[in-house]
Image (cartoon, grey):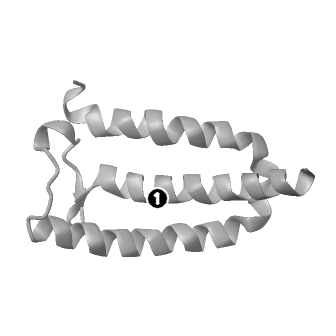
Amino acid sequence: MFGSLTYLVWLAVFIGVPLLALLRWRHLFAPRGRALLWIVAGSLVGGWMWDALSVRWGIWFYAPSNIFGLWLIGLPIEEWLWIAGITLMFALLTMVVAELQCEV
């Protein structure tokens, strides 16, 4: 649908927009910045191992017509953005839900 930008557009809509919405609670995130960095770093390492092996073994692939074409350590850049973005989104969402539960 969007050619080589399909995966990037998908990431912007389904991860970027929710992350922007979560910025309303950014005062919760700053004190936990170091923990968030460790969480994202861990997910990047684990996600890279899982995904790169799966691609290498032919379990799945990324359609060249739907990705930008920039690869880093065996994965397209979009997959790195997916791993970091989804991890960050759910970590921030967990903090927001926990905060809202404390207010009730």
| Residue 69 drawn at (x, y percent) | 18, 46
Up-down relation of residue 25 to residue 29 (above or below):
above
Foreground pick, 80 / 1:
1
Pointer 1 residue: 84
| Residue 62 drawn at (x, y percent) | 17, 50
Up-down relation of residue 71 to residue 53 (above or below):
above
| Residue 97 drawn at (x, y percent) | 74, 53
Dividing the picture into quadrants, the one containing residue 20 is top right
Q: In which quadrant will I find the N terminus?
A: top left
Give the side of residue 47 with respect to residue 3, left or right.
Answer: right
Instruction: Look at 40% across and 52% down and name the residue there.
Output: 81
* Amino acid type, callout 1: Ala
> What element does badge 1 sit on?
helix
Q: How many labels does the image show?
A: 1
Q: Count neighbours of disc 1 (C-alpha within 10 A) and say few if under 14, some if 14 to 19, many if 20 or more.
A: many
| Residue 65 drawn at (x, y percent) | 13, 37
Foreground pick, 103 / 57:
103
Q: Which residue lies furthest to the left in this view?
A: 58
Q: Which residue lies furthest to the top in this view?
A: 1
Give the side of residue 3 with respect to residue 84, left or right.
Answer: left
Instruction: Look at 12% across and 43% down and name the residue there.
Output: 64
Instruction: Look at 41% across and 68% down and name the residue there.
Output: 44
Instruction: Look at 49% across and 71% down and name the residue there.
Output: 41
Up-down relation of residue 6 to residue 54 (above or below):
above
Up-down relation of residue 80 to residue 40 (above or below):
above
Give the side of residue 1 with respect to residue 21, left or right.
Answer: left
Give the side of residue 39 with respect to residue 42, left or right.
Answer: right
Dividing the picture into quadrants, the one containing residue 38 is bottom right
Q: Residue furthest right?
A: 103
